[in-house]
Amino acid sequence: MEDFFSPSIIAAVTALILSLITLFQFFKNQRFQQKQFEKLSNRNLTTKLYDLRLENYPQAFDITDDLFKNKGGNYDSEQIKDVLKNLLEWKKGVVNLIISVEARDSYFELRDALMKNPANGNSFSSEQITKIDNSTRNFRKQLRRDLGFMFREEKIRRNTKNK
């Protein structure tokens, strides 16, 4: 029994326990550093995404600004065709990569509404006018929402720093 508690065995067990604790701390620290790296990496990618959105989204607002009703509350079919052509051109390339799912869906809804031929010869029906109006409003709202995330995230970050 005396050999069981000899100083060399106590030292070995103590060293083993300390090694296990150190190993646990190492893995815990490594996991924390990995999460920090991923967070920083995601923040950099998010910043690039917002920069690209800030660069490309104003064009969509300019294009949809050309959607306005003439006197009598109807749209000019040539004006609709021009807006549709410009929207289709705008969506090509980088915008396809940076647009959110919600904004993309609202874009498709607007595109489909603009692709419809006027119901009454050269004038659109009241349902078509309502659909174009609502689709345009929803599309612009989704684009603003995409950019609004940036400001909301910034506000949250500032509030957490102040606490």
Image: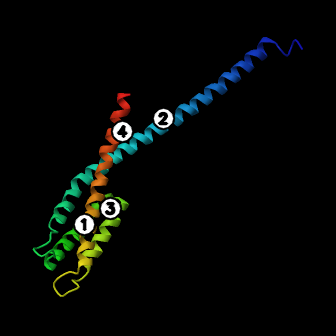
Q: Earlier in the sequence, mark 4 or mark 2?
A: 2
Q: CA distance from mark 3 to mark 4?
A: 23 Å
Left or right? Give the position of 41 relative to 59. Answer: right
Residue hosting label 3? 103
The outermost residue toward the bottom is: 121
Residue hosting label 4? 156
Disc 1 packing (10 Å; few <14; some 14–19; many ≥20): many
Q: Earlier in the sequence, mark 4 or mark 1?
A: 1
Q: Earlier in the sequence, mark 1 or mark 2?
A: 2
Question: Residue 65: horizontal and vertical position, in percent?
Answer: 16, 64
Element class at badge 2: helix
In this view, the mark in front (1 or 2)? 1
Q: Earlier in the sequence, mark 3 or mark 4?
A: 3
Residue hosting label 2? 33
- Mark 3: amino acid: Ala
Asked whether the beta carbons under mark 4 and mark 1 sit within 8 Å of each other, the answer is no
Q: Quadrant of the C terminus?
A: top left
